[in-house]
Image (tube, rainbow, N blue to C red):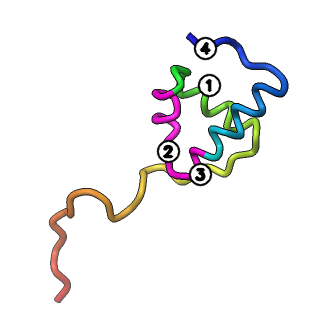
Amino acid sequence: MNSRLEGADRTKTALKMQGRYYAGSSIRNLADSTGWSYGTVRNLLISVDTEFRKRGGVKGVGPKRNRPQKP
């Protein structure tokens, strides 16, 4: 289990996570790779003023849905 982060170590770790988040990692991926909870990772990202993506992932990825054809 990871130890409690404080001060400069907390900021340094949060900035590294922010870089990974901006590079495309999800909060869930960051949590899984670090062993911290989703909430802890999110709070670290908030502490360094991370601009969060909208929920729902990247559009246009995954199976296409059956949509009615336009006339």
- Asked whether the residues under the numbered discs 1 and 4 touch, taking CB atoms below 8 Å apart as contact, a structural biologist would say no
Contact (Cβ within 8 Å) of mark 1 with mark 3: no
- How many marks the image carries: the answer is 4
- Which residue carries the number 4 mark? 2
Q: What segment carries the magenta color?
A: 20-33
Q: Does the magenta run of residues contain 39?
A: no
The amino acid type of the residue labelled 2 equals Ser
> Residue drawn at (16%, 80%), measured in percent from left and top?
69
Labels 1 and 2: the sequence-earlier one: 2
Which quarter of the figure has residue 41?
A: top right
Residue 35 drawn above or below residue 29: above
- Say which of 42 and 25 sits in front: 25
Q: Secondary structure at mark 4?
A: loop
Q: Amino acid at mark 1?
A: Thr
What residue is at 75 percent from the left and 33 percent from the top?
12
- The N terminus, quarter of image: top right
Kindly report the distance in space between the C-alpha atoms of the residues bearing marks 1 and 3. Answer: 17 Å
Q: Position of residue 37 (x, y in %)?
A: 54, 22
Going from the N terminus, do you reach mark 1 or mark 3 first?
Answer: 3
Q: Does 26 appear in magenta?
A: yes
Is 15 placed above or below 5 here?
below
Mark number for residue 25?
2
Q: Which residue does the numbered mark 1 point to in the structure image?
A: 40
Q: In the image, what residue type sits under mark 3?
A: Tyr
Sort mark 4 into few (<14), some (14-19) or many (20+) by Cα contacts within 10 Å: few
Amino acid on which the number 4 mark rests in the picture:
Asn
Give the side of residue 5 with respect to residue 69, left or right: right
